[in-house]
Image (cartoon, rainbow, N blue to C red):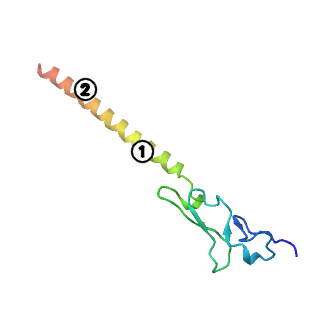
Amino acid sequence: ANCTPCPPHTQALQPGSTMIDNCFDCVPGACGKGNCSVPHHPVSFEIFCTCPFGYIDNDRCSIPWEGISIGAGLVFLVVAIALAAYCLRRKIATILNRARGK
C-alpha cells in the first residue's frame, strides 16, 4: 500500500499512513506560538489554533503588527497634539502677561 499525503498543516499520527483518516496531528509549528488541534468532527482537516494572549488566530497565532503599528501611531499623535496644545497655551499666556504689563 502507498502512503497517503495529509492535507496542509496536518500529519498522520503514525508514519507511513495509508488512509487520510489518520491525519489528525498538527505539523510542528502549524500554530506558531499557540496550541494546535485537528477536530475530528466534522472531518475537514482544518487545524484549530488556540493562541496565547496578544496573538491572533487569523495568521496562525502571529503577533498583530498592524494593530501595534496603528496603536503606536495613535499614541504618538495624541502625545504630539497634547504637547503642541501645552506649548501654544504657554505662548498665549506669555503674550497675555506681557500685554497686561506683568
Of mark 2 and mark 1, the one earlier in the sequence is 1
Q: Estimate the x, y position of residue 80 in percent, counting from the top left.
A: 37, 36
Image position of 63 with respect to 85: above or below: below
Quadrant assignment for the C terminus: top left
In the picture, measured across the screen, residue 54 lies left or right of residue 85, that is: right
Q: Estimate the x, y position of residue 72 in percent, counting from the top left.
A: 44, 43
The residue lying toward the viewer, choosing from 78 and 94, is: 78
Can you identify the residue that label 1 sits on?
Answer: 74
Inspect the image, locate mark 1, and give the three-letter code of the amino acid beneath it.
Leu
Image position of 25 with respect to 95: above or below: below
Circle 1 packing at 10 Å, graded few (<14), some (14-19), many (20+), is few
Q: CA distance from mark 2 to mark 1?
A: 26 Å
Q: Which mark is residue 91?
A: 2
Image position of 19 with respect to 79: above or below: below
In the picture, measured across the screen, residue 54 lies left or right of residue 17, that is: left
Q: Estimate the x, y position of residue 30 in percent, counting from the top left.
A: 65, 60
Q: Which mark is residue 46?
A: none
Circle 2 packing at 10 Å, graded few (<14), some (14-19), many (20+), is few
Residue at figure coordinates x 87%, y 73% from the top left: 2
Inspect the image, locate mark 2, and give the three-letter code of the amino acid beneath it.
Lys
Image position of 69 with respect to 32: above or below: above
Residue at figure coordinates x 42%, y 44% from the top left: 74
Residue at figure coordinates x 56%, y 56% from the top left: 33
Secondary structure of the residue carrying tag 1 is: helix
